[in-house]
Image (spheres, helix red, strand yellow):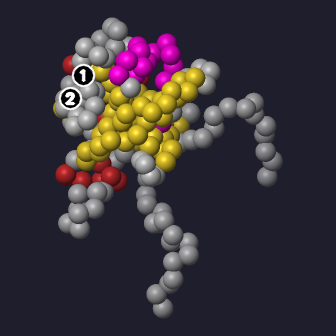
Amino acid sequence: MAKISFKPGNMLYPLPVVMVSVADKAGKANIITVAWAGTICTNPPMVSISVRPSRHSHHMLLETGEFVINLTTKELAYAADYCGVKSGKDVDKWKEMKLTPFASDFVMAPCIAESPVNIECKVTKVEQLGSHDMFAAKVVAVHVDDKYMNEKGSFCLEDAEPIVYSHGEYFALGEKLGRFGYSVQKKNV
């Protein structure tokens, strides 16, 4: 097997597809699609998003220091793509994509009702990295859609059909291969 050397770049794929809702100090809300999003700490729960300073929502993030990460699904793929290619300067993405805002508990930015998971965040640090600024944030609240709760009280995100992004394309997730620790689990004899 031969390997081909590429120039240094971000080849960490697939990525979660998330729509981030933000609001300015006056309460005007917008939605952006962010590919650079992830978990950075368990305790306290923290996440990060990276946004280009040229994006319309960048100034909102700096003004309020708050945002909501809204997970996306197969059903939301079209809206996620639209929110990533259209600017909130030019269109009302909530209206155009028929998305429903609902009030967050702790941040000014609204949650997207159609999303199965809404993660309210307060920025703790902004790091200017080059093409993007990274917003590290503490998770202050999480909302989940009760239709994805099972009889044991567990949240089943896989039932919502979450999507991922890889090299400019969106993909639905496939079959379950195992549960964490299955490689060392004792076999029933």
Q: CA–CA distance between discs 2 and 1?
A: 8 Å
12 versus 49 height, above or below: below
In this view, the residue in front, 44 or 10, is 44
Residue at 42% in and 47% down: 45
73 versus 176 height, above or below: above
Q: Give the residues in magenta.
A: 48-64
Where residue 48 sits: x, y (%)? 48, 36
Residue tagged by mark 2?
Answer: 101
Where residue 69 sits: x, y (%)? 36, 35
Q: Which amino acid is tagged 1?
A: Trp
Q: Is residue 77 something that shows in the picture?
A: no
Of the numbered discs 2 and 1, the one sitting upstream in the chain is 1
Mark 1 crowdedness (10 Å alpha carbons): few <14, some 14-19, many ≥20? some
- SS for tag 2? strand
- Is residue 121 in the magenta section? no
Residue tagged by mark 1?
Answer: 94
Q: Which amino acid is tagged 2?
A: Pro
Residue at 25% in and 14% down: 26
Tell me the mark number nearer the camera, choosing from 2 and 1. 2
Where residue 133 sits: x, y (%)? 53, 24
